Amino acid sequence: GLKTLHLGSCVITTNLHGIRSGFSEIRDSVQAKDEIIDIRILRKTQSLQGTKPADRCCLLHHILRLYLDRVFKNYQPPDHHIFRKVSRLANSLLTIKKDLRLCHAHMSCPCGEEAAEKYSQILSHFEELPPQAAVVKALGELDILLQWLEEA
Amino acid sequence: DGAAVLPAPQNLSVRSVNMKHVLTWSPVIVPEEIIHYSVEYQGEYESLYMSHIWIPSSWCSPTQRPECDITEDITATVSYSLRVRATLGSLTSAWSTLKHRFNQNSTILTPPRMEITMDGFHLLIKLEDLGPHFEFFVSYWRKEPGAKEHVKVVRPGVLPVYLEMVEPGAAYCVKARTFVKAIGRHSAFSQPECVKVQGEALPL
């Protein structure tokens, strides 16, 4: 059902269960294409849980922008079935990002140093990889992002 | 280039009731020929980030009927663009696009159909299964002045539901409404249904 995300003073609800079930339908096929197994883009040291509450909203906002701007957009689905599932994920995460933007408008999504530092680390992990490999790995790591959201 | 020879489908619209969404259009008529249609959609994400990308619908690429169940394609609470074109052999019409984008939060929610039954002195309710999006708020009370109204939340798939023990000779009323979390909306309440319990009222 609906999950309430507590991101500092930004509190939003989202259909996390629906997103998780949508992702689980493609997880194995996406992760199977990730050949770089000894590197992670979303690392524990940059997790939402390891970030002070006030900065969690901003960090998540940046991560979602990375996914929407550079992952979903550049992912090449092998077939229409996967394409529809990825579209569902992209549109669902877009909904979350729109809610975070509302928090931002209401001054409840501040961007502190910690959020900026952790996001730049995530971005560098992403950019260290060849572009298409980074896209595939990041999509497979939605597992991790959803885990962070489930614990938020 | 035969692209524009076939007329494009007209009068596109979406009929959405209880989170079931059907796109309809006026059929393209070519005497003694079978026309096929292809439906494609774009979520808000695709419109914003990759506007040249359209996704073939799950069930109607192609189809022969002038309608398409797009329920499985509308999977997020964002606005969707939809388009249809007609095909006859190698001839293909231009695309027709739905004038107003569709969002599932505009679906019509109807009061649920319900059936009140008794099992001995147990009051039971049976509710229509509207699918995984739906929860039911069931309200029930003893039909007498000042009676307290009880509410029970029933999740999809749990039918029929036991409501409460009843007393012989008393009357009880029940009403229900649906709630869809994904869009944060509920239906109107159904008309109350009342039942009278057999037997003599217990002495006070």
Image (cartoon, grey):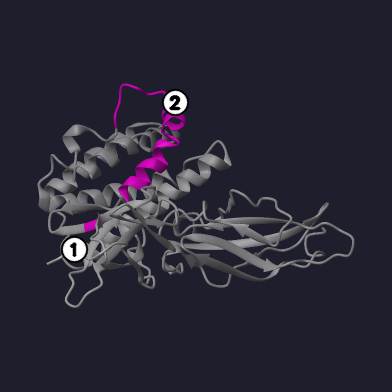
Decide whether residue A93 is among the magenta residues.
no
Chain under numbered label 2: A
Decide whether residue A30 is among the magenta residues.
yes
Where does label 1 land, which residue?
A: B202
**Which residue corresponds to the image point at 52% horizontal and 55% vertical from the top-left?**
B71
Q: What stretch is highlighted in magenta?
A: A12-40
Name the amino acid type tagged 2: Ala
Give the quarter of the image for residue B203.
bottom left
**Which residue corresponds to the image point at 52% horizontal and 43% vertical from the top-left?**
A83
- Say whether mark 1 and mark 2 are on the same chain: no
**Which residue corresponds to the image point at 23% horizontal and 62% vertical from the top-left?**
B151
> Left of A72 or right of it: where is B141?
left
Q: Residue B7, image x and y in percent?
A: 78, 68
Is residue A100 among what the camera can see? no
Q: How many neighbours does mark 2 have within 10 angstroms: few (below 14), some (14-19), or many (20 or more)?
A: few
Please state which of residues A43 and A91 is positioned toward the viewer in this rendering: A91
Q: Residue A13, image x and y in percent?
A: 25, 56
How far is mark 2 from mark 1, CA to CA? 69 Å
Where does label 2 land, which residue?
A: A32
Chain under numbered label 1: B
Give the residue at the far right of this rendering.
B32
